[in-house]
Image (cartoon, rainbow, N blue to C red):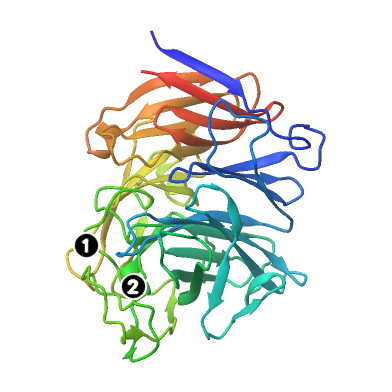
Amino acid sequence: MVVCQASKIHLPTPFASPSSSKTPTSLLFEPHSFSLALSHSDSSLSLFPSISFPFSSTQKSLSIPPPSSSSTFLLLKTQKSPNPRVLFVVAGPYKGGSKVLLRFFLYRNDGSKAFEKAKVVVSKQKGIEFDDKVGVLIDVSHGLKLIISGSVNFFALYSVSSSKVLIFGVNLVVDTDESDDGIAFKLMKFAVIDCLKPVFSISISFEWLVLGEENGVKVWSLRELVKGKKVKKVKNYGLSNGVIGDNNGVSNGGSSTSEIVSNGHLDGKIEKPSVSVKPRSGKHRQESAEPGACFVPFEPKEVKGLTSAKASSMSLKAISIQPLSSKRFLILDTVGDLFVLHVTDTTVGSDVTCYMRLLPHVMKVQMMAVFPDISSRRQTVWISDGHHSMHVVDITSAVNETDKREIVQAIFTSEKIQDMIPTAANSILILGQVSGVLDFTYLY
């Protein structure tokens, strides 16, 4: 017999009232610091650090005023410090949307367990400036939609109106475990991708950037995107910057045996203090067939009631991308089908080899969530039809290319599910249409 527990999260006033202008609209969770971010209908944010369950209405939080259109958590790792730092990045419009405003908030590693406004140093690059009153200003148009996705030491920003994907790196300027006072971060723009086709979703993790497009996804080697062009003697703080991630794990956990440093080489070594790569962003084109990039189409499938010619001409969009491991991603398309993307490469600078596999049907999926747990042998995914049901699915066999997939548990709610985010392998927070945030936990 499977036992499932559900409890309502009592948010501090005025967040709890459905009629309030601060009604929650979406959720984000960061497992390293156990922090929860709530987006509200007035485009403000509430950031709850180091949460615990049962959730208390007195839980301290940081209120981030509007406007905010997209946000993400970002981990910072260096070879000198085994404990990653957690940053929360908020993107929004500035001056009528003519520019994008970035705000950064640091989770303190000391006993305070709180977020505070981060100190940011901006590199001297075209299109980036720092305003001490508001934050970092990026010279791209905000437009109607903005997508931001973070990983370890890097994050990607997509502007629909500007048709550009920008890749940023964040580097520790001061590295100390004794005190968080004086900690600062350097922001650098590493790459710009000009897009001729629309992008519907983004995932940046491990060593890959994956763009959700029409009828498939575009995969980029992050190593190739952030590769430096020239090496010069400039001021250096003795710290490398890059993506650090376990080859079989996820971007926000575990140790690392390799590292993408700022010169793009996978050497796992700390550079000499007097040598660094001059921050010069590379320019790329979405449709290019350059090394380290490839387009992966959806696997052909039959559609009931349509001829094969009409079915093949249907435009499917990759609307959600979630990392399963360092080489696999879960893709959701607009008709509710799930795919597993497999990515491989052999040597630095080589072409990327990718293929996509359609998973067996359980339901027409409208939303999905993956808990990044490298310690578990089970590959657990939470999926929902966007109405009143969700399923806890073990897709380990399917990911390993067998035809079996086990439904661990089906959970039904009395209200429509708006968003969901896992907090553990067997726990998930659900944003309901009426009751607000609910906590579900099941036992195998």
Query: Is 288 or 388 nearer to us in this picture?
Result: 388
* Residue at 65%, 44% in the rendered image: 61
Q: Alpha carbon of mark 2 to alpha carbon of mark 1: how far? A: 23 Å
Is 322 on the left-hand or right-hand side of 90?
Answer: left
Outermost residue to the top = 1
* Quarter of the image where one finds residue 59: top right
Question: Of the residues under marks 2 and 1, which one precedes in the sequence?
Answer: 2
Look at the picture and state if 274 lies above or below 444. Answer: below
Outermost residue to the bottom = 233
* Residue at 51%, 81% in the rendered image: 123
Look at the picture and state if 240 lies above or below 37. Answer: below
**x, y percentage for residue 173?**
45, 73
Residue type pointed to by label 1: Asp
Is 265 on the left-hand or right-hand side of 204?
Answer: left
* Residue at 38%, 90% in the rendered image: 234
Query: Is 332 or 443 nearer to us in this picture?
Result: 443
* Quarter of the image where one finds residue 396: top left
Q: Can you say which quadrant of the picture contains the N terminus?
A: top left
- Look at the image and tell me whether residue 336 can be seen: no
**x, y percentage for residue 10?**
67, 28
**x, y percentage for residue 417?**
61, 30
Is 188 on the left-hand or right-hand side of 296?
Answer: right
Q: Residues within 10 Å of mark 1 (few under 14, many from 20)?
A: some
Look at the picture and state if 72 lies above or below 49. Answer: below
> What is the number of the mark on residue 345?
1
Instruction: Read off the residue under disc 2.
Output: 240
